[in-house]
Image (cartoon, rainbow, N blue to C red):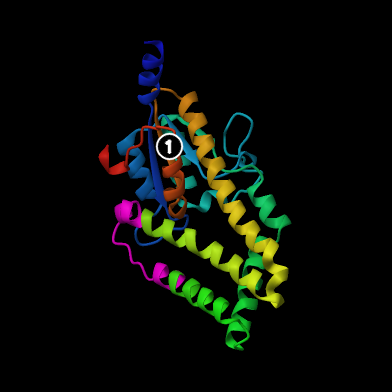
Amino acid sequence: MLLFLTFSCYAQTKVCVIGEFHEENKLINPDTLFQILEKIKPDLILIELDSSFFTKDFNFDFDKDPDFLSENQTMASYRYQQKYKIALRPYDISGRNEFYKKEKYFFNERESLNHILSLHSANKLSKTSENYFNLFISTVELYNQVKYNSLKEVNSDLNQKFTELKYKTIYDLIISITQDTEELNKWIPFAQLQKDFWVKRNEVMAENIVKYSKEFENKTIVVFMGFEHKYYIVNLLKEQNINLAEYWEF
């Protein structure tokens, strides 16, 4: 009976995961997210930042980076927090930005793809790697051609499934190409690192959401994230029996 009561109490915590674009576009801006927050009336907002962007008492650390409020989710969250004095928390993996700098992540991502493309253009890839690369290009191009008519479409189950298909494909294809092509073997560690960090980062983000769900029991929590993370994190939260709701259900 005690276990049942504990679960029932925990189940009252409601988590609303909102996939969004970090930069303003025709579908979304800080006002869009602020209006959603006004409708949901959360007790806690989780933001896709790591703890280094916050002070010890969980206020934005403007000395750290005065420009981070330029993103949709941070601007909307800060505005809502100032108006209603609710809690804000970071939930991204610790040291995210330092990791990117240390690994020269975006430089290596660009250089590795350019190297593959140059071999492709020179017809120096094996037939197997050529097929892998064509599948990679087709997957990315098809994904990039998707046009959204609303934020609700961005957060739909269909779009989550499509995004999941993309990420279950592209990393493994690049790993296979670098393994199959001797000239590209130097990129094998980075190709594996890309996949491993994507998995680890999403898992840590989900773990932190679960942690805050327990800490803020019986509360309503909004979680902002880049929409491409949503499929992965929602799947993990469902495994933990987190009580999920979409923003349009409020």
| Residue 171 percent location from the top left of the image | 55, 62
Q: Residue drawn at (68%, 52%), measured in percent from left and top?
A: 99
Instruction: Give the percent coordinates (x, y) of residue 71.
Output: 49, 52
Mark 1 closeness class: few <14, some 14–19, many ≥20 residues within 10 Å: few
16 vs 167, left or right, is left
Residue 156 in view, yes or no: no
Q: Which residues are magenta?
A: 140-159
User: Residue 156 versus residue 223: which sits nearer the camera?
Assistant: 156
Judge whether residue 58 is colored magenta: no
Q: Secondary structure at mark 1?
A: helix
Is 182 left, or right, of 205 in this rendering? right
Up-down relation of residue 75 to residue 185 (above or below): above
State the residue at coordinates (27%, 43%): 248
Q: Residue at x 45, y 55 (%)?
A: 228
User: Is 119 displayed left or right of 157 in the figure?
Assistant: right
Q: What's under tag 1, amino acid-wise? A: Glu
Q: Quick check: is 144 in the magenta stretch?
A: yes
Give the number of callouts.
1
Residue ID for mark 1: 239
One can see residue 94 in this view = yes
Which quarter of the rendering shows the C terminus? top left
- Of all residues, the one furthest to the left in this rendering is 249
Q: Position of residue 243 (x, y in %)?
A: 36, 32
The quadrant in which the N terminus is found is: top left
Name the quadrant containing residue 118: bottom right
Of residues 231 and 151, the one drawn nearer to the viewer in this rendering? 231
When the figure is inspected, residue 243 is found, relative to residue 172, above or below; the finding is above
Q: Residue furthest top?
A: 1
